[in-house]
Image (spheres, rainbow, N blue to C red):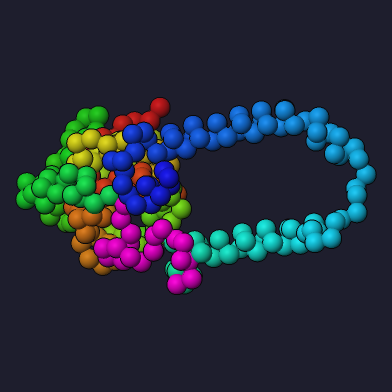
Amino acid sequence: MGGLINISRWYDALPFFFTTGHYWGAWLAVGALLVHLGVKLPTIREALARRSEPEQAGGLTRRELLGTVSTAAGVITLATVGQTVAPLSPVSVLAPRRPTVGPQGLPVNKTAAGAGVRDLAMSPAYRLVVTGPQNELTLSLAELGALTQHTVVLPIACVEGWSATGTWSGVRLNDLARLVGLDPAETSAEVESLERAGRYRVSTVAPTHVRDDWTLIALRLNGAPLHLDHGYPARLIAPNRPGVLQTKWVGRITLRRHT
């Protein structure tokens, strides 16, 4: 039931954090399995000690059982893998997401309206605040656009199982670090969203990502300005990070020397 609620993005219906609920469920399942094995251990030992009896007529052989399980697993895989592998999406009838369905050809989990940031993100007074140990920059969207722009091709890889690739353009995070007088190789960043609340409104970017030329504060997606639901006016995009850590609607970046 929790999985169906999550796929439907009906997060308000969950009285607990979805990931925490999965961990608790996993620990309960492991505990129940260990108790079951402990209770059944004498029966298991007795069955293993007996010689194999001839198979009853009409029963499945081991090969038939394995073949049935493998076939079922293959069908389920084909029915879901299309949420990541676009060519297979027509046959992936059980996939909760389609990799090309959404604004600018990418899926969206949380909209600007759902995050409560529409007015702040669309305000002409928007400024990105970049703070370093010694100084601070306040950049308008036009000023961000006037900085050197770079383009990368990176996926949004969601922890729910889907991923979709986009072409992103914007300012390198390491260039912003240099603007406030820091060496990107020795700098970590705290990226804050315009969201007022939320578990992932702030994400930490390690020095390995700060110095990576593929880590951008993106302003454009697939050749057009970011759609509001994809993080307009600016969002974080970096390689090898789950989608929940690719912060949208970025309002402040705090850069620190990493020790």
Q: Is residue 115 visible?
A: yes
Q: Is residue 259 left or right of residue 42?
A: left
Q: Residue at x 36, y 66 (%)?
A: 100
Q: Main secondary structure of the magenta part?
A: loop
The residue positioned 86% from the left and 34% from the top of the image is 46
- Residue depicted at 22% across the width and 59% down the height: 226
Q: Is 92 within the magenta?
A: yes
Considering every residue shown, the one lying at the far right of the view is: 51
Q: Is residue 75 left or right of residue 115?
A: right
In the rendered view, does 224 fall on the left or right side of 48? left
Furthest residue in direction left, as rendered: 124
**x and y percentages locating residue 19 in the rendered image:** 43, 38
Query: Which corner quadrant holds the C terminus?
Result: top left
The magenta stretch is: 90-109
Indicate whether 85 appears above or below 119. below
Q: At which x and y percent is residue 45?
A: 84, 33
Residue 125, placed above or below residue 149: above
Q: Residue 202's quadrant in the figure?
A: top left
Residue 94 colored in magenta in the image: yes
Picture coordinates of residue 203, whole percent (x, y):
33, 38
Foreground residue among 70 and 125: 70
Res. 217 visible in picture: no
Residues 225 and 229: in front is 229
As drawn, is 6 to the left or to the right of 71? left
